[in-house]
Amino acid sequence: MTDFTMKKDADGVAIITWDVPGKSMNVMSMEAWPLLDSLIDDALADDAVKGIVITSGKEGSFAGGMDLNVIARMKDMAGDNPAQGLMDGLMNMHRILRKIERAGMDPKTNKGGKPIAAALPGTALGIGLEIPLACHRIFAADNPKAKIGLPEIMVGIFPGAGGTTRLSRKLGAMAAAPLLLEGKLNDPKKAKAAGVVDEVVSADQLIEAAKAWVLSNPAIVKPWDEKGYKMPGGAPYHPAGFMTFVGASAMVHGKTQGAFPAAKALLSAVYEGALVPFDTALKIEARWFTNVLMNPSSGAMIRSLFINKEALEKGANRPEAPDQRVKKLGVLGAGMMGAGIALVSAQAGIEVVLIDQKQEAADKGKAYSASFMDAGIKRGKATEAKKAELLDRITATTDYAALKGCDLIIEAVFEDPGVKAGVTKQALAEVGRDCIFATNTSTLPISDLAKASDRQEDFIGIHFFSPVEKMLLVEIIKGQNTGPRAVAKALDYVRQIRKTPIVVNDARFFYCNRCIIPYINEGIRMVAEGVAPALIDNAARQLGFPVGPLQLVDETSIDLGAKIARATRAAMGDAYPDAAVDEVIFWMEGEGRLGRKSNAGFFDYDEKGKRQGYWAGLADKYTRAAEQPDLHEVQHRLMFAQVLEAVRALEEGVLTDIREGDVGAILAWGFAPWSGGPFAWLDIIGTPYAAERCDQLAEKFGPRFATPALLREMADKGQSFYARFAGQTEAA
Ligand code: NAD
């Protein structure tokens, strides 16, 4: 183990260098802790050592954090009594960091001790900042690309190696709040302004500056180890602190609706820790962190949002094929989607030909990129030169001949099979045999659209979500005859534009819309039953969904819902199951209440488009039931409506990998992220309970909740999805 090494120089400074072999960025492992511990012991015991500098051997970074793969497995590795095992492990980490912080000082008088500085060449995240926070001074190289912060909350945990306690004591709860609760990252200059790091120096001066400070005989007692320490901004029972903590509690609850265990635990650790001496606060932090690690949510979130997301981005399901990165992209249709696709592709350095029927329409599509860049320039995120470079890559035209040389075409014209077939033929006539053709359709079967091509193996669905530049997921759909090179091309392209892909098979609404539509429909059904709209939307938000189903349909528009309903009804005939839903949306459409775009939908809006509350006319038409359902029943209806679709998609082979089902659900429509996704949620509640609950819901509300055969079988065997399908790419 050589993750940490130490050299003692002639000036009496011990330089501890963190340099994990074979990794481009340092990550902390369980095995590295004892090594760091022993090096600190050695330096503190050596009379020739006057002080210590802890730095990194990696250029441009200190550390990326704890190895999340390890955190995800910590509970399983913690022995027969995992809570105790976790607590012991955390307290051992605290012991080592506290040793750095106390640096050999006399515990009573605070005399003695050796100064320890952290010298960060760049990025310092998670434990990569918690170790420096235990040091006496933090130096950061002036590297504007570096990111410094504690992003743990983003994957369902919180800084549990003293970062929570130290940062809130260093900055005060108010100033620490965005860094801890939102995982806000800063470049070194901003980190200094925020009070997180102490000095920013040029990269070539970094070690020298840290050494000079160490040798300057500085004061090293931390404020919280001095008598009479008061938390900046006040502890909870101080009048100012009282306001901060009441406000923070309200803000966290407003944002998370209580659905994210880590946010609540973090706040409790800060609040309770602020009332007691520092060492007790660390114990409280460790207890809350143990609590979070014992909750299945943290493991599920790390698995989906970090481990599996990254695996999919790196091509976990990519067929063998040579590099298929796109050089020249054709985009057909410069409307809302086409304009966004052109933008994200040009941002990735790809040459784009953007085609529409009229030159004005094509120009308008390109102008979207210009205004996007203008907004970036205003916020200091882009420059005129970058804008010019990006716009140079986009050719807006009506001339299909400009497509010559394209190796990928994405069609985003009107959702009409005839129009789509026309442009497919026209475009394919201009390009070489190596060009892959993709459609961005959201509802039409890929296998049918592929018939317009004489090379169906090179035809595929690349389904973006709106707004393209914001949404992180791209759903790739294989038609019946789609070949491996088309899949590899789509995956390589999605990687170029830095989004996360899932690959699914062709079926009505593919995967994502297949699950989103029943979620929306279940909400609308409840409206027709007289359930209070606020109960419906709030039930969803308290499950961690960013918006409830009624708000969601207002955003996507009611006429779009009506259009999809008509098309689905025509395709399914008597088997169509959603007449009760249609009654509501066709009526709303008839009333001109089309959602946000018409400033009138399930909500009322003011003239600026701000939501004003639910439309009173709804209750006139659908009388509010005297007895409102139980919150949990509403939540289970909304959850199972989506989750059962995901299970059916797996059963039918539309999904072939549950990782894609879970990652896709969180990124595409914000499926309760704390759960890790639909399959992870079923594993958390247990398949036997899930099947039992479905039986009850089916009896009360109808066959749409009937337990799918796969779930029934798994319930009978007591199986979980991740145990049964782990490591398989062909899940079903
Ligand atoms: P849109 O109406 O904004 O844009 C369509 C564009 O295609 C228009 O600019 C139109 O002039 C152009 N067009 C029509 N016929 C053409 C032709 N023959 N040649 C060249 N250009 C032509 O529509 P949109 O919302 O961008 O949707 C486009 C496609 O993307 C549809 O298939 C839709 O289902 C799909 N989609 C939409 C969304 C969404 O949220 N809007 C999401 C995913 C997928």
Image (cartoon, grey):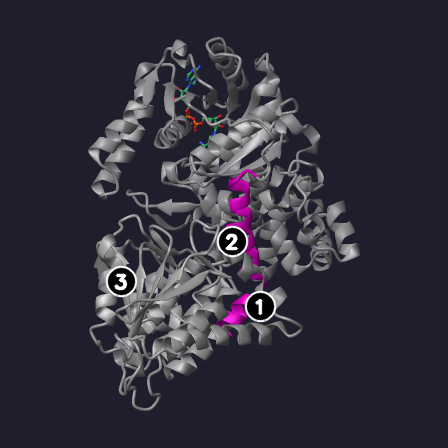
x%, y% of residue 85? 59, 74
Badge 3 is on which residue? Answer: 139
Q: Which of marks 3 and 2 is in front?
A: 3
Three-letter code for the amino acid on which mark 2 is drawn: Pro
Was residue 416 drawn as part of the magenta stretch in this picture? Answer: no
Q: In this view, does 32 lie to the left or right of 363?
A: right
Residue in the foreground of this view, choosing between 398 and 596: 398
Above or below, 98 against 385 in this view is below
Q: Quadrant of residue 686?
A: bottom right
Badge 1 is on which residue? Answer: 294
Report the residue at 65% width, 60% height from top. Answer: 685
* Labels 3 and 1: the sequence-earlier one: 3
Instruction: Sort mark 3 into few (<14), some (14-19) or many (20+) by Cα contacts within 10 Å.
Output: many
- Magenta part of the chain: 287-315
Residue in the foreground of this view, choosing between 634 and 456: 456
Q: CA separation, marks 3 and 2?
A: 36 Å
Q: In which quarter of the image is residue 483?
A: top right
Q: Is mark 2 within 8 Å of ligand 1?
A: no
Q: Is residue 375 left or right of residue 77?
A: left
Report the residue at 70% width, 37% height from top. Answer: 652
Q: Residue 673 carries which label?
A: 2
Above or below, 664 against 207 in this view is above
Q: CA separation, marks 3 and 1?
A: 35 Å
Q: What element carries label 1?
A: helix
Residue at the extreme bottom of the image, as rendered: 108
Q: Does the residue labelled 1 lie within 8 Å of ligand 1?
A: no
Above or below, 545 against 601 in this view is below
Q: State yes or no: discs 3 and 1 in contact (Cβ < 8 Å).
A: no
* Labels 3 and 2: the sequence-earlier one: 3
Report the residue at 62% width, 37% height from top. Answer: 579
Q: Does the residue labelled 3 lie within 8 Å of ligand 1?
A: no
x%, y% of residue 565? 57, 32
